[in-house]
Amino acid sequence: MAMRSYPNSRLRRSRATSWSRAMHRETVLTSADLIWPLFVTGGKGVEDPVTSLPGVSRWSVDGIASRAKEAVELGIPCIALFPNTQADLRSETGEEALNPDNLMCRAIKAIRDACGDTIGILTDVALDPYTTHGQDGLVNDAGYVVNDDTVAVLVDQALNQAEAGADIIAPSDMMDGRVKAIRMALEMGGHHNIQIMSYAAKYASAFYGPFRDAVGSSGVLKGDKKTYQMDPANASEALAEVALDIAEGADSVMVKPGLAYLDIIWRVKERFEVPVFAYQVSGEYALIEAGAAAGVADRDALLMEKLVGFKRAGCSGVLTYHAPVAARILNG
Ligand code: PBG
């Protein structure tokens, strides 16, 4: 690199005017970089606000279809679905996840009817919205989440979503070997073009609280998820997770949460030829809203600075509850 020295180089020259700043901008964020996570609830015509996520609601299936149309209008290419399963349909083993007429499948079909293939539908594979204990898999008598038996159920859950019309299967459970098992089942089932976006590096995080409220698992969750989600102190292990998931058949990988893990995003992007997505999780959303409400800074400015940071770190896109807000800002 050529040696730069003052005053031959004055880096402020390019910053002096708005047109020049625009011309030198290295990272551009658009609404196509956004994936919008949505919570589905039962009933018809229902909008049920999530108290811990101000501005976010659970929508009944008809409302979800409207949100999908809104996403298309805003240029958001993909939505992610999470169900709030009614309490009496939850069980120790989460069978409702396999019901072809569950909330998730009904929402997928309603979106498809409303939007055709103008929007991508990403579905969550994990049992926590369906179990009475709030863990992502099957638990044994000691309360330990067992791996291989859980994977067998997750495969059936993924196939159920695929048959309902999901475009991207996103396993968030962190069991070992689930990507391989799901990929094989999708291939055998003729679903050759269904993508898998694996939650490859998902950390046992304090930032998930409002999400657990939204899907109704916070009150029931016993213990924590540290025997399957990653230790926030680990980075090499994240690269190992990503390598395994790619080898097992993931088309893209996710790092979750977002802001505290920008180094992981960067390292994954440097090491692997695979699209990387960040999940700006519920606690991150809530903190932006709380910070703005407390007068720390303007909400939109906080939000856009964080989102562009994900893109700069190497992300192909970001899952964010702020997707419609951000798209409106970006679309002017
Ligand atoms: C669990 C799941 C979680 C989130 C997405 N899928 C929470 C958890 O691991 O307990 C969190 C997302 C968020 O906080 O926005 N399968």
Image (tube, helix red, strand yellow):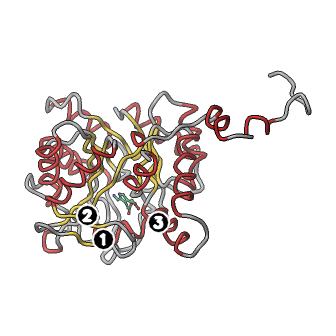
CA–CA distance in space, label 3 to label 1: 15 Å
Using the image, determine if residue 155 lies above or below residue 180: below
Task: Determine the image quadrant of residue 76.
Answer: top left
Mark 1 in CB contact with mark 2 (< 8 angstroms): yes
Among numbered discs 1 and 2, the one appearing first in the sequence: 2
Looking at the image, which is closer to me, 196 or 31?
A: 31
Task: Determine the image quadrant of residue 169.
Answer: top left
Q: Position of residue 95 (x, y in %)?
A: 14, 60
Residue drawn at 22 percent across, 61 percent down: 40
Specify few, some or many for label 1: CA neighbours under 10 Å numbering under 14, 14-19, or 20 or more.
many
Helix, strand or loop under label 1: loop
Residue drawn at 40 percent across, 51 percent down: 328
| Residue topped by disc 2 | 129
CA–CA distance in space, label 3 to label 2: 18 Å
Mark 2: C-beta under 8 Å from nearest atom of ligand 1 = yes
Q: Nearer the viewer, mark 3 or mark 1?
A: 3
| Residue topped by disc 3 | 283
| Residue 121: image tag | none
Q: Nearer the viewer, mark 3 or mark 2?
A: 3
CA–CA distance in space, label 1 to label 2: 6 Å
User: What kind of residue is marked 1?
Assistant: Ser
Is 269 on the left-hand or right-hand side of 285? right
Residue drawn at 86 percent across, 28 percent down: 4
User: What kind of residue is marked 2?
Assistant: Pro
| Residue topped by disc 1 | 217
Among numbered discs 3 and 1, the one appearing first in the sequence: 1
User: What kind of residue is marked 3?
Assistant: Gly
Specify few, some or many for label 2: CA neighbours under 10 Å numbering under 14, 14-19, or 20 or more.
many
Mark 3: C-beta under 8 Å from nearest atom of ligand 1 = yes
Q: Position of residue 44 (x, y in %)?
A: 10, 66
Mark 1: C-beta under 8 Å from nearest atom of ligand 1 = yes
